């Protein structure tokens, strides 16, 4: 059963209209997303199908959900907007930070990461989306494996006190400590940097930072990372092209050796034979049919973002694993457009940025070096004070020795951000004010200053600049559909059976 409209172009992350008005398409017009436009390139069919369970997204949330469902015997269709990014020794799957190309950005005509040169290119279903908000942009992964493709992989278990300060009441830290964190560790296999690598010239910036931490009277730590450090050794031996050892990991690690979600949870889910991963399937809207079944409105696109087919997939059970930004946008749109009646009022609220703050650090006369081995592998946990903070050295793959590197701070932030539906963009837009994390930012700045040197003299000899105040982004979006406000303790949306 198919209705026919025209082939459409998705002009960017929000699907903004590019070439005119939607031509036709009964299903799309009735319940599908607005804001899409048609080109004159040819016909697009709308097809319909029913599935027992549908999972949106293939990052941590979506992949683990699909695996658990499959192991319980449930057949799953997993919808992923992006493509697969297969890695292996000396592959060139991902672009490089300082020589980027169209693979770098999700349907956007230039790079979206701060610091990556803004070269123009033809939009592509690339690996990083920048979700543009008011006062804050979110950077998140797109592709099979979600954010794990591009994340550094810092895998840090919180203390019981900090867990209780930041997570909803009703979640038992003891269960996380005894069971859940261990299960994750058994798959991701986090490991700290071994001595021989930390002492290699390529990791000079990490050693410098640890020295500063020790000199400030604190104890540094090595960050557990989900990777096989032998890959870095093989880079230093010249067997693989450098990636880890130059810190060139922000668009993904070409050589592999990283236990990202695509090669762990997604691979395990697919190996059950019960999970079908459909790539280049961009979910535009979700709705609830009068029958109570869930309807997923999907554009199947090509890597240029052109719509090849529209799908309406009904399901008994719908799981939203599209990340904080993706899931919240779908829910806020559904509520604002009346596609799902009676969604909880908390949808879109209680959003926070993890306190993310990136500072440059330029110790004059004592350069961190051109080669800054990564991923971010050393830091300091300052968790006992009123503002518990984690501060990490963030290596940068500079093409030349610029005498600088970065230091990143995180903390527990007030979740004051809110997504609001914008009918012109047909999207939910994040609203944030730097006032929400001003105090936390001050605490991070002071903590970093107290590590790399105190006072006005050291500000001259070891300057730091808060880059996040210039371009306000986060890699760590959290909230928007939180337990207690929107979901119960199992993640079931309140009053919405099967969601
Ligand atoms: C550069 C960077 C570095 C980071 N470093 C760290 C780190 O060191 N340690 C750490 O713990 N965290 C880190 N993070 C954060 C971490 O990646 C995220 O917290 C994590 O990936 C969130 O998992 P998730 O499953 O909720 O969402 P995601 O991993 O974002 O997965 C969501 C998936 O849904 C897909 N999707 C979204 N919308 C749609 C749609 N409408 N239709 C179809 N598919 C859709 C996306 O393509 C994606 O694959 C980093 C993130 C970035 C960007």
Image (tube, rainbow, N blue to C red):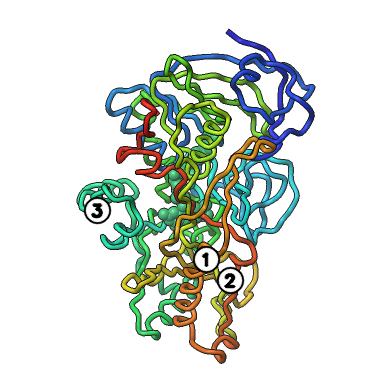
Pointer 3 and pointer 1: residues touching (CB < 8 Å)?
Answer: no
Label 2 crowding class (10 Å Cα cut-off): few <14, some 14-19, many 20+? some
Q: Residue at x 40, y 67 (%)?
A: 390
Label 3 crowding class (10 Å Cα cut-off): few <14, some 14-19, many 20+? some
Q: CA distance from mark 3 to mark 1?
A: 27 Å
Q: Position of residue 47 (x, y in %)?
A: 57, 14
**Which of the numbered marks, if any, corresponds to residue 305?**
none
Q: Position of residue 188 (x, y in %)?
A: 34, 49
Q: CA distance from mark 1 to mark 2?
A: 7 Å
Q: CA distance from mark 2 to mark 3?
A: 34 Å
**Which of the numbered marks, if any, corresponds to residue 357?**
1
Secondary structure found at label 2: strand
Q: Is residue 379 visible?
A: yes
Q: Is mark 1 within 8 Å of ligand 1?
A: no
Note whether 165 is above or below 345 in the view shown.
below
* Quarter of the image where one finds residue 269: top left
**Which of the numbered marks, if any, corresponds to residue 173?**
3
Q: Residue at x 36, y 68 (%)?
A: 222
Horizontally, residue 483 falls left or right of residue 186, namely right
Pointer 1 and pointer 2: residues touching (CB < 8 Å)?
Answer: yes
Specify the farthest residue to the bottom.
457
Mark found first going from the N terminus, 2 or 3: 3
Q: Position of residue 487 (x, y in %)?
A: 37, 38
Residue that carries the numbered disc 2 in the rendered image: 466
Note whether 295 is above or below 419 in the view shown.
above
């Amino acid at each position: 059963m198919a209705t026919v409209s025209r082939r459409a172009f998705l002009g960017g992350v929000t699907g903004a209209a590019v070439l005119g008005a939607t031509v036709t398409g009964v299903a799309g017009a009735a319940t599908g997303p607005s804001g899409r436009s048609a080109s004159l390139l040819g016909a697009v069919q709308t097809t319909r199908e029913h599935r027992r369970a549908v999972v949106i997204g293939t990052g941590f949330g979506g992949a683990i959900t699909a695996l658990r469902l499959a192991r319980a015997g449930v057949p799953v269709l997993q919808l992923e907007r992006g493509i697969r990014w297969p890695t292996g020794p000396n592959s060139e799957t991902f672009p490089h930070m300082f020589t980027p190309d169209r693979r770098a950005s999700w349907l956007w005509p230039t790079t979206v990461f701060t610091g990556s040169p803004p070269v123009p290119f033809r939009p592509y279903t690339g690996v990083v989306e920048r979700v543009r908000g008011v006062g804050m942009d979110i950077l998140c992964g797109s592709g099979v494996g979600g954010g794990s493709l591009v994340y550094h992989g810092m895998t840090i278990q919180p203390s019981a006190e900090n867990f209780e300060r930041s997570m909803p009441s009703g979640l038992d830290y003891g269960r996380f400590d005894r069971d859940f964190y261990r299960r994750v560790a058994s798959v991701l296999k986090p490991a700290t940097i071994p001595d021989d690598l930390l002492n290699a010239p390529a990791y000079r910036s990490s050693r410098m930072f640890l020295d500063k931490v020790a000199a400030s009277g604190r104890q540094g730590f090595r960050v557990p990372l989900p990777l096989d450090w032998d890959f870095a050794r093989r880079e230093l031996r010249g067997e693989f092209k450098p990636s880890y050892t130059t810190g060139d990991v922000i668009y993904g690690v070409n050589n592999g050796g990283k236990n990202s979600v695509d090669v762990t949870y997604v691979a395990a889910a697919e190996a059950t034979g019960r999970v079908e991963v459909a790539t280049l399937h961009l979910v535009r809207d979700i709705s609830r049919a009068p029958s109570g079944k869930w309807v997923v409105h999907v554009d199947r696109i090509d890597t240029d973002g052109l719509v090849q087919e529209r799908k309406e997939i009904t399901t008994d059970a719908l799981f939203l694993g599209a990340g904080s930004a993706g899931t919240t946008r779908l829910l806020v749109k559904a509520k604002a457009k009346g596609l799902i009646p009676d969604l909880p009022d908390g949808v879109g609220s209680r959003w926070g940025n993890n306190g993310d703050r990136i500072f440059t650090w330029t110790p004059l006369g004592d350069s961190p070096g051109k080669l800054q081995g990564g991923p971010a592998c050393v830091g300091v946990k300052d968790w006992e004070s009123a503002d518990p903070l984690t501060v990490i050295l963030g290596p940068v793959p500079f093409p030349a020795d610029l005498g600088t590197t970065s230091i990143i701070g995180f903390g527990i932030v007030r979740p004051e951000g809110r997504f609001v539906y914008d009918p012109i963009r047909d999207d939910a837009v994040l609203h944030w004010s730097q006032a929400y994390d001003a105090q936390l930012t001050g605490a991070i700045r002071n903590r970093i200053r107290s590590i790399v040197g105190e006072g006005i003299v050291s500000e001259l000899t070891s300057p730091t600049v808060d880059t996040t105040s210039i371009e306000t982004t986060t890699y760590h979006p959290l909230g928007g559909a939180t337990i207690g406000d929107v979901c119960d303790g199992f993640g079931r949306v309140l009053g919405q059976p099967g969601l």
